[in-house]
Image (tube, grey):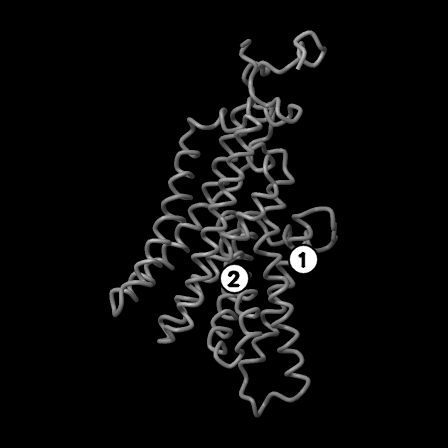
Amino acid sequence: MNQHSPRAQTRWKGETYYDQPALKYPHWDWKVSGYIAVAGTAGAAQALVTAASLRDAQLLRPARRGARLIALMGTAAGAAMLIADLKTPQRFYNMLRILRPTSPMSFGTYIFGGFGATSLMSTVNDLPATTRQRPLRLIGKAGQIGSALSGAGIATYTAALLSATSNPYWAAAPRALGVNFAGGAAAMGAAALALWERFGGRDDTARGFEKVAAAATLTHLGARIAADKRLKETGVTDTIADTAPQRRLNAETWLAAGALPLLGYAAGAVVSGRRGRGAAIAGSCAVLVGGMMMRHGMLEVGKAATERPEAGFALAQPSGEGRKDNGS
């Protein structure tokens, strides 16, 4: 850029308004991060098992039963955490009164409600075959398909919700954040199903879900790399790299939700007998725990970014100009 041009002369040099935060501090806590993790796990489990059942419905009948249980438990726990965060059930009810398709929060509330309803409908499939007449079979099938589609939405809409805010850490890389959330939810959903199958004595189907969990783990790690690249390009990374939440998130992403699950699954694949089975179970547990830690960590880093006014100003600069001009 020509140093005598107007843009060069007005390029941001790191100025802030007396170092005062320019953005509102988000007060979301563990209840919101817990909802993101639990609802994403439940939704992904329903979507994955429904897709897998297209290949062998009879073999995965126990897994579908497990996914329905995970979905119902996730819906109940997620609703409880949302209501607790809103402080009163009336606010949750008010969110359902008006549908705003352009609002991720409004749209997501309906997706979540639809997921709970269709998951409940899908439990009809667990009734004895002799009692399931044609109308009940249609209800069960519609519930299974509906819960799979809405489950996929639950696994990803929270990324749209975060990236639609003005928070620089969440808004800098919306596409990568979406892939990260989708991959993380798929890994957690597959891990939950793998544990269900392992403890049910169905090791063969459990191995299939463990492979999905491992692949999804690699996917969310790849998305994290892409997001970090974008954050660095915009200059947001430079403003929060020294914060404790950012250091914790790095450990949670690459160790707790990355290396430990992959090592567990790798050991489970090459070691036979009880030790291999135990390693695979440990890998699935690491996916679930690490995924929850990573979701909470992302909220905490977002909070830290609002306390650094430079982060918001860096993201607001024209493309490629987010870094401070130190006069060099």
Q: Position of residue 152 (x, y in %)?
A: 60, 59
Residue at mark 1 to residue at mark 2: CA–CA distance? 16 Å
Image quadrant assignment for residue 165: top right
**Residue at image location 50% in from the left, 78% down from the top:** 61
Residue 92 in the image, given as x and y percentages of width and height: 63, 53
Residue 196: give x, y in percent of width and height: 41, 69
- Which residue was labeled with disc 2? 42
In the picture of the structure, the residue carrying the numbered disc 1 is 110
Residue, x 47% and y 73% (percent of image)?
Answer: 63
Identify the amino acid type marked 1: Tyr
Q: Report the amino acid beneath label 2.
A: Ala
Q: Is residue 247 left or right of residue 10?
A: left
Q: Residue furthest bottom?
A: 130
Residue at the far top: name it: 4
Secondary element under disc 2, as helix, strand or loop, is: helix
Instruction: Using residue 267 as the reference point, say whether residue 29 is left or right of it.
Output: right
